[in-house]
Amino acid sequence: MNKIIDLPWCIIGDLNELANPSEKRGGKHYPLSKLTRLTSFMDRIKASSIPFTGYPCTWKKRLQLHIIYERLDKGIIWNDWLKLYPDSIVKHGTFSCSDHSPIVLSVANPIQRRKKLPFRFQNYWCQYRQLDPIVGKQWQSRIQGTKMFILSQKLKTTKQHIKLWARSFLGNNQQKLLTTLSKNRTD
């Protein structure tokens, strides 16, 4: 497959193989010769396993009075998948009507899902003379209400005007930061 597809890829599902003895609970010991099949395959194609959360086993079977649990369902990735999706994780669900628990691949990218960064006043902005009239005008504005309401409204309008000034005069630093973070994750 690597010779055909030279892009990051992911396979998720019932691989029907164990990678190590800790992926089996109960029943007879799994032969070591079988344990090497999945790891040898992954080594040969230079793939890796996606981390998981939840109960470690995804398959169960009852034999007489014993229950056997195994981790047969997995996700494997290749060729810089984690650079594109650094938060990739396989989530193991709970058993219900099937002998397999559901598994879900989550690939949320924190840069894409990140909320808007909060406004932060930078102390070095005080060096710019353009800021003085902006702040002065907002504090001299007339607002009706209690003293606390007046204070909160003046702070609010001052913040809005300083944000506009900072964006127009200094540029959109938040967008630059997100672009830099995104670029660093892909490099």
Image: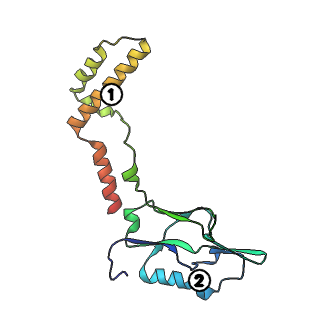
Crowding near the residue tagged with mark 1, few <14, some 14–19, many ≥20 C-alpha atoms within 10 Å: some
Considering the numbered disc 1 on the image, is that residue within a helix, a strand or a loop?
Answer: helix
The one nearer the camera, 69 or 186, is 69
Label 1 is placed on what type of residue?
Lys
Circle count: 2
**Which x, y percent locates residue 176?**
28, 47
Which residue is depicted at the point 44% across and 76% down? 47
Can you tell which quarter of the image residue 172 is in?
top left
Position of residue 178 relative to residue 146, above or below, is below
**Which x, y percent locates residue 53?**
56, 61
Position of residue 75 relative to residue 44, above or below, is above
Position of residue 127 relative to residue 187, above or below, is above
- Side of 180 where 114 appears, left or right: right
Considering the numbered disc 2 on the image, is that residue within a helix, a strand or a loop?
Answer: helix
**Which x, y percent locates residue 78?**
40, 73
Label 2 is placed on what type of residue?
Leu
Position of residue 17 relative to residue 105, above or below, is below
The tag on residue 35 is 2
Earlier residue among tags 2 and 1: 2
- Side of 104 where 83 appears, left or right: left
Q: How far apart are marks 2 and 1 (CA)?
A: 61 Å
The tag on residue 133 is none
The one nearer the camera, 113 or 165, is 113
Which residue is depicted at the point 28% across and 19% down? 138
Which residue is depicted at the point 42% across and 61% down? 86
Can you tell which quarter of the image residue 119 is in?
top left
Which residue is depicted at the point 34% across and 32% down? 121
The residue beneath circle 1 is: 159
Can you tell which quarter of the image residue 70 is in?
bottom right
